[in-house]
Amino acid sequence: MSGRRVVITGIEVLAPGGVGAKNFWNLLSEGRTATRGITFFDPSPFRSKVAAEIDFDPEEFGLSPQEIRRMDRAAQFAVVAARGAVTDSGIELGAVDPYRLGVTIGSAVGATMGLDEEYRVVSDGGRLHLVDHEYSVPHLYNYLVPSSFAAEVAWAVGAEGPSTVVSTGCTSGIDSVGHAVELIREGSVDVMIAGSSDAPISPITMACFDAIKATTPRSDDPEHASRPFDASRNGFVLGEGAAVFVLEELESARKRGAHIYAEIAGYATRSNAYHMTGLRPDGLEMAEAIRVSLDEARMNATEIDYINAHGSGTKQNDRHETAAVKRILGDHAYRTPMSSIKSMVGHSLGAIGSIEIAASALAMEHNVVPPTANLHTPDPECDLDYVPLTARAQRTDAVLTVGSGFGGFQSAMVLARPERSVA
């Protein structure tokens, strides 16, 4: 590995209640929730009838009729976010060797909404067992192959270097950025457009999570349905969204006078090899990912100022994550604020890891720790400082963000101010 250090110079976010990085941060810092009753389809047959939806008109964000026809909603999110991140960074991509410009996009469930809609069309609403493909859209193949997300972003930014989709369940958003960082560090590229996107709010997704009782049945009070770390929590609220970043080598970014949000100082991922959806309560595998990410960042656990939690709001996840943090941070865990933005924007599966990276970088930018909304009744098993209800002003030089996904994936990333001393 080379000594190259990687920084974030551009951010764009599409999230429920906050399209655009500025609106997204305003929502978080004000502790507002964007969860509501499902409007995309009739939710009455389902156990969980709430979601965190985005009010998104692709034409308003500059997508052409052909792009809208060609791309699934999640791909549209990715392209819009990529263009926004490039604009935010101020980078002149025309001056970058296209072979040294790459793309990584994370997604857990690909073109779910497009596939769901097309199945209803070709099967005549599920009536036909033998479907008629002639009724499908001409770009159905793009829905079937998630790599189309990376291809669309690469075309949008003119990237001819490495281009890939990372799909590791709910850690996809961290892992896609982590992969991009490694490509820059090893010298394969100079600039990466990296992030993730998912738009899973569809009948098939709701049915799947209903079956395993992972989503909350608290449908009578959508605004307060997502309750990470609260004693009354009973599942997550499904969401959608995207976040994309411009990543560059530190010295190159400084030379062009770029605004630097944060350095990605450390990253690691592990698997528990234990259960498709279950978690061991000791949090050992997440703790190991945290430990390795801190080692890569050359930081002590006591240097972490804020932890952006996975905090899904399921009973087992919140206990597992709390145990992992205690295992690595020790007594410092009790002095370190930790919060879950899923309480406000829901759980957008593969996209959420990148959205949480954006929240972490913006927390450093503004020296404000976003709160955990709807946390009124502390769970005795979750006894850390989860910043309930209200954001907290605090100098924040280093943030740990973590993710946990079906399949046993556990990922951790450390963001820090680049001016810190590195041994």
Image (spheres, helix red, strand yellow):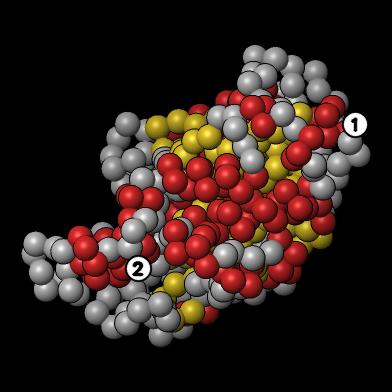
Give the image quarter of residue 59. bottom right
Q: Which residue is mark 1?
A: 255
The residue lying toward the viewer, choosing from 4 and 368, is 4
Q: Of the residues under marks 2 and 1, which one precedes in the sequence?
A: 2
User: Residue 28: where, in percent of width, then height?
Assistant: 68, 66
Q: Residue furthest top?
A: 1
The residue lying toward the viewer, choosing from 34 and 326, is 34
Q: Please tell me whether residue 296 is drawn above or below residue 377 in the rendered image.
A: above
Residue at 80% from the left image edge and 42% from the top image edge:
92
Q: Which residue is mark 2?
A: 202
Secondary structure of the residue carrying numbered label 2? loop
Amino acid type assigned to the residue bearing label 2 in the image: Ser
User: Residue 121: where, in percent of width, then height?
Assistant: 24, 70
Residue at 28% from the left image edge and 40% from the top image edge:
275
Q: Please tell me whether residue 421 is drawn above or below residue 321 in the rendered image.
A: above
| Residue 397 in view of the camera | no
- Circle 2 packing at 10 Å, graded few (<14), some (14-19), many (20+), is many
Amino acid type assigned to the residue bearing label 1 in the image: Lys
Q: Quadrant of the N terminus?
A: top right
Q: Quadrant of the C terminus?
A: top right
The residue lying toward the viewer, choosing from 132 and 423, is 132
Q: Is residue 26 left or right of residue 77?
A: right
